[in-house]
Image (spheres, rainbow, N blue to C red):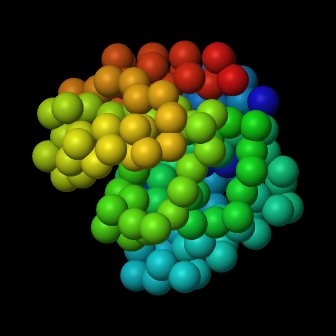
Amino acid sequence: MKILFLHGLNSTPGGQKPTTLSNAGHEVIEPYLPSNNWVDSVSMAQEAYDEEQPDIVVGSSRGGAVAMAADMSPRKMILIAPAWKKYCPNCTIPPTTTILHSPEDDVISFADSRLLSKMYGAELVIAGDDHRMNDSGALAKLMQAIDNS
């Protein structure tokens, strides 16, 4: 399956989550999203989506907000602790979206994801030990969300 992975603010391509997806046999596209330029980040994500036409878009933290801001309509969108309230408070998501978030997250409030889920009818899955979402439990829930697509 072809997956567009949009990393978070303090992350770069090649992290634990996209590496796990790649090791599972998925084709993972990971554009670099500049942390100091929101408009360029959305534009670069849009360009990657348009060129690659992935089956699934996965956005982590700020990358989740980037996914929401871009004009994408993948078969499935998976948002990991999306920072939508900070970067994209007026963006919407399709009801087929899955949101993964840890109640122990001390960077992005779990309540933000609960609200986003209620507003758009998206599935909210409790996962992970913290904001990084790279522990084995969080990675297993990410793989499950991909496999259920």
Quarter of the rendering containing residue 88: bottom left
Q: Residue at x 64, y 66 (%)?
A: 70
Quadrant where the N terminus sits is top right
Can you see residue 32?
no
User: Residue at the location (26% across, 32% down)?
Assistant: 102
Locate residue 124, reporting x and y percent: 41, 29
Q: Is residue 147 visible?
A: yes
Query: On the rendered structure, is 89 left or right of 45?
Result: left
Q: Nearer the viewer, residue 102 or 114?
A: 114
Residue occupying image coordinates x 24% and y 51%: 108
| Left or right relative to 66: residue 46 | right
Compared across the picture, whether 110 is left or right of 145 comes to left
Question: Is residue 85 positioned above or below 76 on the image?
Answer: below
Question: In which quarter of the view is residue 115 placed?
Answer: top left
Query: Where is residue 66 shown, x and y percent of the image?
Result: 53, 63
Residue depicted at 45% across the width and 20% down the height: 141
Depth check, front residue: 17 or 144: 144
Vertical relation: 20 (above or below) 45: above
Rendered location of residue 80, percent (x, y) = 42, 41
**Which residue is more in the foreground, 118 or 29?**
118
Left or right for 53, reference 33: right
- Give the position of the C terminus as an image quadrant: top right
Q: How many marks?
A: 0
Residue 125 vertical position relative to residue 62 in the rendered view, above or below: above
Q: Image quarter for residue 104? A: top left
